[in-house]
Image (tube, coloured by chain):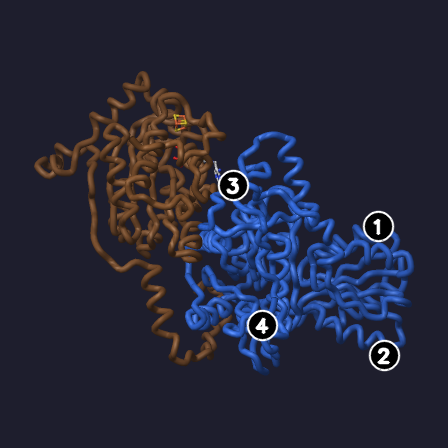
Chain colours: A brown, B blue
């Protein structure tokens, strides 16, 4: 039995999260993973953005940083470089990581920096009361999509894979043991790891979409998820409305802080030319014609 | 503490202001840089990209300026001295996380090599139009520190000073350069490392358990700790108490925000840095900063040759602004002449401090080139008339010649 309390700032309880919210299950999965790996609490830094999910940093007894909306991954990039021995985790939401922070998300994956991102995907902006998110399914309601979302939605995991992440897994609070295992594997991975966790928001998503009680919200997720192994046997049509869970990518690649350390080593004894060539100045005529932005 | 020899290129060099700023960062002990290219600041990043790996520092080109600012806060929080550089459009994007740096009290440096704005404006040409943005650009109330170098040598010296002030007062400090100073090449003397004073991080002597991350010392600034050493603190951009925990009350807000303001206001006497000349018997005082302080020289020299009593204040710390200095002078001075490459920004501070006791004459320029010294000279002449109504025939400022 894991003693979860030793990882929590109990003095900060009760949590701000609503009854029926799935965030606590994802958080518990993260703490379980940390416990099984046996990490030293002092050597873990958790960085979060802004949102209900991002408030998790306030409750866990590690080095914690609650930053600005969307910027947690960029902030964590600096933390990791300043101290590559720290285990750096990011807790973020679907809006935080893929709307306002979408650019930082894909670029961190591209760099393959050793950060583990635990992304709480509840298909909505919870904290601000239920506005549409980049993951809100087409046709579903949000306060800012009162007639149903006219837009399409992101497949976040596929986005991370395409951008170059070395570990991507998708889990759900409806299978908490597996979810925690994915988080464990992600933390153990040297490289950019994403664990996308489906989690219900009965308050801001469920209510607007008439999804019933808290438990019915979980049912809604269950009906839509399918394990990657089972999914392999199905046709694209059969998979159309399904959310594929499991480990989607797990590859070995060079990690960014390692590569940078090698670069430092390789230039240590060679002279560096400090002369930076004068750049060509754009002729005024071109600049005036709007041909060049500098 | 003395500078670490590793990063210091002791000797006499021929450098432009951007390169000198980069060398200043190295000498100050900066070992993390995150930035996004933008004219006319890019050379700072380019030099650091070449220099940092040699001293074990990290250079990273981020995806944008929001990320750059966030990354330097993260690195500084992780215990490394960190900086970024930019120009107007990027400075605007950084404002969000500059606010986070102020709220979390993270020491770091932002060099803004100013160009003409608004928007993309004049990418390759000079401006001094971000002076008020430096003071008030991020939302909310806070105190800020900004320095304005007027030569490549000063780009070196003032960058070190900016790092030192940021460590002392725990906030992002701005080096408000301009395109002229950034791109002009002059002799820059880099001293021996043991002649360079650097302020180390103010680390708390208290053990975990006793340490409170936001309990301020007598100077209203709290001490820091390093991540990984057992303190396990929480820090947030939300209004927080001394433990760093969110406290969403008007009382906590009042206490915190007043301290963020007071840590600069109450220490301003120690922070101020300006060059003053001939203030004792001046009829007119020229207040200037950055490249404009050098253009004003020609006008002041001409006025002195004419036998006029002209004093000078060159602002080195533009923020905090030395209002008391202006207020005291105003009683015995007919006018302040304030040339700047904007349509009147720091002049508003001069006017506020002078409070009607002396006349304030802005000498404005929308950017793209420096002033014609004649316009400053004419303003000095005009200033001799003091608060008397301006002559009808007073010459309009001459149209600037393009370079
Ligand atoms: C720059 C900025 N824009 C907008 C907001 C308002 N805001 C706070 S949380 C949030 C959305 C959070 O949604 P998500 O990331 O999905 O997290 P959740 O609350 O659902 O866990 C928004 C828009 C903000 N804090 N900062
Ligand atoms: S609004 Fe939604 S996401 Fe936020 S705490 Fe409530 S249930 Fe959870």
Residue at numbered disc 4: B17
State the separation of the CA atoms marked 3 and 1: 40 Å
* Residues packed near mark 2 inside 10 Å, few (<14), some (14 to 19) or many (20 plus): few
The answer to whether dots 2 and 4 both sit on one chain is yes
How far is the residue under mark 2 from the one under mark 4?
31 Å
Residue B242 tag number: none
**N-terminal-most mark, 3 or 2:** 3
Check residue B236 in the rendering and tell me which mark sits there, or answer none: 3
State the mark number for residue B355: 1
Assess disc 1: are there few (<14), some (14-19) or many (≥20) residues with their C-alpha within 10 Å of its C-alpha: some
- Secondary structure under badge 4? helix
Residue annotated with mark 2: B305
Question: Left of B246 or right of it: where is B362?
Answer: right
Of mark 1 and mark 4, the one earlier in the sequence is: 4
**Mark 3 → mark 2, Cα distance in angstroms:** 58 Å
Q: Are marks 4 and 3 on the same chain?
A: yes
- The kind of secondary structure element at disc 3 is strand
Spatial CA distance of label 4 from label 3 is 36 Å
| Closer mark to the observer between disc 3 and disc 2 | 3
């Amino acid at each position: 039995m894991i003693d979860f309390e030793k990882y929590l700032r109990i003095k900060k309880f009760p949590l701000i999260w609503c009854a029926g919210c799935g965030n606590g299950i994802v958080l518990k999965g993260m703490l379980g993973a940390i416990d099984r790996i046996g990490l030293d609490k002092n050597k873990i830094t958790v960085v979060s953005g802004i949102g209900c999910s991002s408030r998790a940093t306030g409750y866990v007894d590690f080095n914690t940083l609650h930053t600005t909306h969307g910027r947690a991954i960029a902030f964590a990039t600096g933390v990791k470089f300043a101290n590559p021995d720290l285990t750096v985790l990011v807790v973020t939401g679907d809006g935080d990581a893929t709307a306002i922070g979408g650019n930082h998300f894909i670029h961190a994956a591209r760099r393959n920096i050793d950060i583990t991102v635990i992304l709480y995907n509840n298909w909505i902006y919870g904290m601000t009361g239920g506005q549409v998110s980049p993951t809100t399914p087409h046709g579903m309601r949000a306060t800012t999509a009162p007639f149903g979302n006219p837009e399409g939605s992101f497949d976040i995991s596929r986005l991370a894979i395409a951008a170059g992440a070395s570990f991507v897994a998708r889990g759900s609070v409806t299978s908490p043991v597996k979810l925690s295992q994915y988080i464990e594997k992600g933390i153990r991975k040297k490289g950019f790891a994403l664990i996308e966790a489906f989690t219900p928001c009965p308050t801001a998503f469920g209510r607007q979409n008439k999804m019933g009680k808290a438990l019915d919200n979980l049912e809604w997720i269950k009906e839509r998820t399918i394990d990657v192994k089972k999914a392999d046997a199905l046709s694209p049509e059969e998979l159309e409305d399904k959310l594929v869970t499991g480990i989607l990518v797990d590859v070995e690649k060079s990690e960014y802080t390692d590569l940078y350390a090698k670069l430092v080593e390789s230039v240590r004894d060679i002279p560096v030319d400090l002369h930076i060539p004068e750049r060509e100045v754009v002729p005024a005529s071109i600049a005036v014609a709007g041909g060049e932005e500098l | 503490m003395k500078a670490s020899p590793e990063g210091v290129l002791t000797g006499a060099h021929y450098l432009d202001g951007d390169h000198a700023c980069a060398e200043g960062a190295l000498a100050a002990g900066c070992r993390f840089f995150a930035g996004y290219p933008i004219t006319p600041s890019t050379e700072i990043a380019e030099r650091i990209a070449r220099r940092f790996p040699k001293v074990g520092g990290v250079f990273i080109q981020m995806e944008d300026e929001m990320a750059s600012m966030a990354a330097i806060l993260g690195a500084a929080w992780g215990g490394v001295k960190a900086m970024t550089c930019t120009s107007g459009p990027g400075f605007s994007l950084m404002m969000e996380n500059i606010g986070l740096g102020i709220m979390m009290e993270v020491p770091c440096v932002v060099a803004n090599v100013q160009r003409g704005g608004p928007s993309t404006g004049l990418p390759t040409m000079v401006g001094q139009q971000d002076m008020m943005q430096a003071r008030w650009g991020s939302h909310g109330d806070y105190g800020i520190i900004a320095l304005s170098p007027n030569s490549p040598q000063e780009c070196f010296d003032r960058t070190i000073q900016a790092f030192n002030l940021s460590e002392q007062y725990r906030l992002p400090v701005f080096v408000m350069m301009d395109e002229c100073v950034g791109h002009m090449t002059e002799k820059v003397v880099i001293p021996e490392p043991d002649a360079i004073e650097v302020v180390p991080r103010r680390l708390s002597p208290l053990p975990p358990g006793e340490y409170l991350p936001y309990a301020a010392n007598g100077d209203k600034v709290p001490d820091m700790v390093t991540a990984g050493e057992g303190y396990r603190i929480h820090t947030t951009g939300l209004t927080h108490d001394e433990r760093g925990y969110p406290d969403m009350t008007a009382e906590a807000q009042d206490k915190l925000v007043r301290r963020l303001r007071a840590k600069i206001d109450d220490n301003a006497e120690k922070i101020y840095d300006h060059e003053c000349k001939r203030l004792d018997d001046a009829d007119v005082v020229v207040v200037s900063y950055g490249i404009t302080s050098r253009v004003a020289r020609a006008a002041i020299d001409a006025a002195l040759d004419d036998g006029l009593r002209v004093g000078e204040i060159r602002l080195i710390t533009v923020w905090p602004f030395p209002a008391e200095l202006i207020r005291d002078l105003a009683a015995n001075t007919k006018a302040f002449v304030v040339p700047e490459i904007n349509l009147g920004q720091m002049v508003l501070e001069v006017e506020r401090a002078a409070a009607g006791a002396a006349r304030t004459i802005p000498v404005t320029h929308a950017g793209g080139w420096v002033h014609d010294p004649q316009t400053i000279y004419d303003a000095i002449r005009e200033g001799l008339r003091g608060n008397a109504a301006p002559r009808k025939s007073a010459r309009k400022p001459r149209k600037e010649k393009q370079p």
